[in-house]
Amino acid sequence: MTMEVDVTIKLKHGVADPEGENTKKALNLLGFKNVRSVKTMKTFRIEVEPEKGNEEKVKQEVEEMCRKILANPVIHDYAIKVVKNPKS
C-alpha cells in the first residue's frame, strides 16, 4: 500500500518574493489590473510506502524530509497533507 503526501513550501511572512512581484507587474501590464499580489510556492507530491499503513509515521518522515532538504527553515514555511491512501 502506498500513500501520497503533498508538501507545500512557501516563503515566510516578510521574506521578499521577487518572482511573485514580477509576475504581479506582468499581469497588471497585461490588463489584469485587479491583481493585488502574487505569492510563489511549490508543491511536492511524494509517494511513500508506509509501515503497516501508519499515517502518523509517514507524516513524521515527510517532516524530516522537509527539515533536511525540501525547505530552508530560515525562509520557508511548509504544510504537509496526506492526499491519497488507496487502501484505507
Image: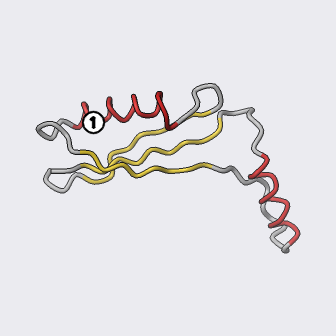
**In the rendering, at what x and y percent does residue 50 appear?**
20, 40
Total marks shown come to 1
**In the rendering, at what x and y percent does residue 18 appear?**
79, 47
Using the rendered view, name the quadrant where residue 53 is placed. Answer: top left
Compare residues 24 and 19 and report the one nearer the observer: 19
Q: Among all residues in the image, which is located at the extreme front?
A: 69
* Residue 44 falls left or right of residue 82: right
Q: Secondary structure at mark 1?
A: helix
Give the residue displayed 27% in from the left and 36% down from the top. 58
* Residue 14 falls left or right of residue 81: right
Q: Which residue is mark 1?
A: 58
Tag 1: amino acid: Val
Q: Among all residues in the image, which is located at the extreme left?
A: 52
Query: Measured along the vertical axis of the image, is residue 75 above or below residue 27?
Result: above
Query: Measured along the vertical axis of the image, is residue 69 above or below residue 25?
Result: above
Query: Label 1: how many residues lie within 10 Å, few (<14), some (14-19) or many (20+)?
Result: some
Give the residue displayed 23% in from the left and 37% down from the top. 55
Compare residues 14 and 49 and report the one nearer the observer: 49
Give the residue displayed 76% in from the left and 53% down from the top. 37
Using the rendered view, name the quadrant where residue 71 is placed. Answer: top right
**In the rendering, at what x and y percent does residue 3 appear?**
25, 49
Compare residues 19 and 31 and report the one nearer the observer: 19
